[in-house]
Image (cartoon, rainbow, N blue to C red):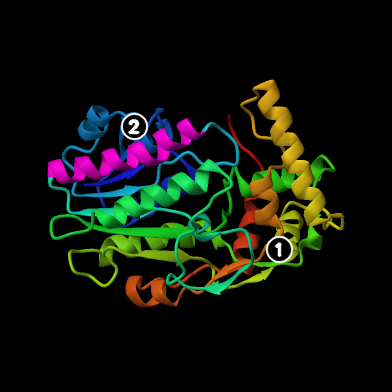
Amino acid sequence: MIAVTGGGGFLGGAIVRQLLARGESVRSVQRSDVPALRALGVDVVRADLSDARACLEALRGVDAVIHVAAKAGVWGSAASFHSANVQATDNVIAACRTLGIGKLVYTSTPSVVHAGGDVANIDESVPVATHFSAPYPQTKALAEAHVLAANGAQLATVALRPHLIWGPGDTQLTARVLARARAGRLRLVGGGEKWIDSVYIDNAAAAHLNALDRLEPGAACAGKAYFITQGEPMPQKQLINGMLAAAGLPPCDRSIAPGVAWLAGAVLELVWTLLRREDEPMMTRFLARQLATAHWYNIDAARRDLGYAPQVTVQEGLARLADSLNRPRTGQ
């Protein structure tokens, strides 16, 4: 049996469905119940992975773990990110060792190497950043380091860094772009000219199965991290306007200067802190830097060591997105 933590989420759910499609027995572990997964025959277990005992019991009886669950976002307390991303991951590692589970595939993020400037065609030889402007990349970097350090003869580990996952059912990137466009609040930082790469949801999920299949003690991928993208870098505005077109919306032609976006993020962070608001502000300094810089990666290592090959192109992904957004809804 294979355990997928965070199986009720966007990426986790896609991984679960791909595992089921090839006949695997799957357990999904997350805090809330997921009736839709139960209906598919998934063993759904509710557990807070930051609780060591609960984590141990949730993973008892499985042969491998794909650890997707995490606290993502650009806002929140450092303690909450540390608990969900570092402590939970440490507990997963400890449970694997105690229970004799031999494989651990960890979902990381390319943000761990982002030091603030353009990131263009880099590979995994680039070191993890030493300074972070938000707790999300900082805690993910720490958790990734723990996972890779745990690799050995009894437990083989690997970390994947999927970048900007999108597609039908996405409640983060895609949903936010469309919501802001419909509200007239969407702006392209610096005109959206910086090049980025992304990864369609089915490709991101398939990469995790590739890693699971290749992973074993001494394997080429064991103890290493890999960037996962479409391998189709393009100007940021091209992808965003592609999403807008899929939803039947006009392209975005409004822009904001990078410095103005950063200043707006600083002001909003101060306001949110003073008001003790827990929801995310529209802009933060971390987000402004992300939107104002290039982000695209060399995925040759993933192709070589994992056998990763994106099967769905950006064009096909946008067509699938359009189909899902325009499909008549039935039932409740």
Q: Nearer the viewer, residue 108 or 241?
A: 108
Q: Nearer the viewer, residue 193 or 309?
A: 193
Vertical placement of 119 versus 89: above or below?
Answer: below
The x and y percentages for residue 285 are 68, 46
Image side of residue 241 versus residue 157, left or right: right
Q: Secondary structure at mark 2?
A: loop
Q: Secondary structure at mark 1?
A: helix
- Marks 1 and 2, the one that precedes in the sequence: 2
Image side of residue 131 versus residue 86, left or right: right
Report if residue 205 lies within the magenta region. Answer: no
Image side of residue 325 versus residue 92, left or right: right
- For the C terminus, the image quarter is top right
Badge 1: how crowded within 10 Å, few (<14), some, or many (20+)?
many
Which quarter of the figure has residue 269? top right
State the extent of the magenta-drawn residues as a range.
Answer: 78-99
The x and y percentages for residue 220 are 26, 72
Which quarter of the figure has residue 151? bottom left
Measured in 3D between alpha carbons, the distance from the residue under mark 1 to the one under mark 2, in whole angstroms, is 36 Å
Note whether residue 17 is visible: no
The x and y percentages for residue 68 are 39, 46
Residue 215 tag number: none
Residue receiving disc 2? 50
Residue receiving disc 1? 236
